[in-house]
Image (tube, rainbow, N blue to C red):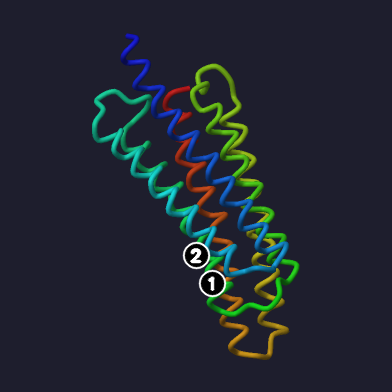
């Protein structure tokens, strides 16, 4: 039993490590957006963090491949690991696009949506800190609800921002740039919600 418990704990530890790293990535993206200076170095830092997260994804999948004992369904662990990796990939990509598109300044909606992304990844991190307690309390379920709320708020802001963009932007190149960037930012929020929804399924099966 001790060996089984140790194997189960390994996955909780790996997922918590990953979620904490994702908060670091989110804060790095927010720093880029809120203080849009030294852009190339900040984008390089995001790429470094994304590479470190690739290693964490690999660690989880390696542990999954080598273990017969998991705290919940193997398919769920796989989906969660890949979902977390997608969040990081999207954040890194949107940061690199700011540099590639030679963006000169950040409009307020971009800063607000990025702030929502950081809120969402922090809620995910809190969720993972308590994931092993799903049979003892409702913290994981409460965090899922909060992440869904943040995503809905982001959806409303995204729609309003896109409407203003198409109504007010007369430069077609700038329109294409910002349409893509806002889509990427909104996709980050969607990716957070997707992970939360997968965990909600785990909670429903095992709580």
Q: Which mark is residue 93?
A: 2
Q: Residue at x 56, y 79 (%)?
A: 101
Judged from the image, the secondary structure of the residue bearing numbered disc 2 is: helix
Q: Which mark is residue 7?
A: none
As drawn, 102 above or below 5 = below
Q: Residue at x 29, y 34 (%)?
A: 64
Figure quadrant of residue 77: top left
Residue 161 x, y percent position in the rendering: 69, 70
Which residue position holds label 1? 97
The residue lying toward the viewer, choosing from 73 and 63, is 63
Dot 1 alpha-carbon crowd within 10 angstroms: few under 14, some 14 to 19, many 20 or more? some
The residue lying toward the viewer, choosing from 207 and 7, is 7
Residue 115 x, y percent position in the rendering: 69, 54
Q: Residue at x 48, y 22 (%)?
A: 207
Q: Residue at x 56, y 30 (%)?
A: 140
As drawn, 54 above or below 173 = above
Judged from the image, the secondary structure of the residue bearing numbered disc 1 is: helix
As drawn, 130 above or below 98 = above
The residue lying toward the viewer, choosing from 99 and 9, is 99
> Quick check: marks 2 and 1 in contact, CB under 8 Å?
yes
Residue 24 x, y percent position in the rendering: 58, 47
- Which residue reaches farthest right? 108
Q: Quadrant of the N terminus?
A: top left
Figure quadrant of residue 20: top right
């Amino acid at each position: 039993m001790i060996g089984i418990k140790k194997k189960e704990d390994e996955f909780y530890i790996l997922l918590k490590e990953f979620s904490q790293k994702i908060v670091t990535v989110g804060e790095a993206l927010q720093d880029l957006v809120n203080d849009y200076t030294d852009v190339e170095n900040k984008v390089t830092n995001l790429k470094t963090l994304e590479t470190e997260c690739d290693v964490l994804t690999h660690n989880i999948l390696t542990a999954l491949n080598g273990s017969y004992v998991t705290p919940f369904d193997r398919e769920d662990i796989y989906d969660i690991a890949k979902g977390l990796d997608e969040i990081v990939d999207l954040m890194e990509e949107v940061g690199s696009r700011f540099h590639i598109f030679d963006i000169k300044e950040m409009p307020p909606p971009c800063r607000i949506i990025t702030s929502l992304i950081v809120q969402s990844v922090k809620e995910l991190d809190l969720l993972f800190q308590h994931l092993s307690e799903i049979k003892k309390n409702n913290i994981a379920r409460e965090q899922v609800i909060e992440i869904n709320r943040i995503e809905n708020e982001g959806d409303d802001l995204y729609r309003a921002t896109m409407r203003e963009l198409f109504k007010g932007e007369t430069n077609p190149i700038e329109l294409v740039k910002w349409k893509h960037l806002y889509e990427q930012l909104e996709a980050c929020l969607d990716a957070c919600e997707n992970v939360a929804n997968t965990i909600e399924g785990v909670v429903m099966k095992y709580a």
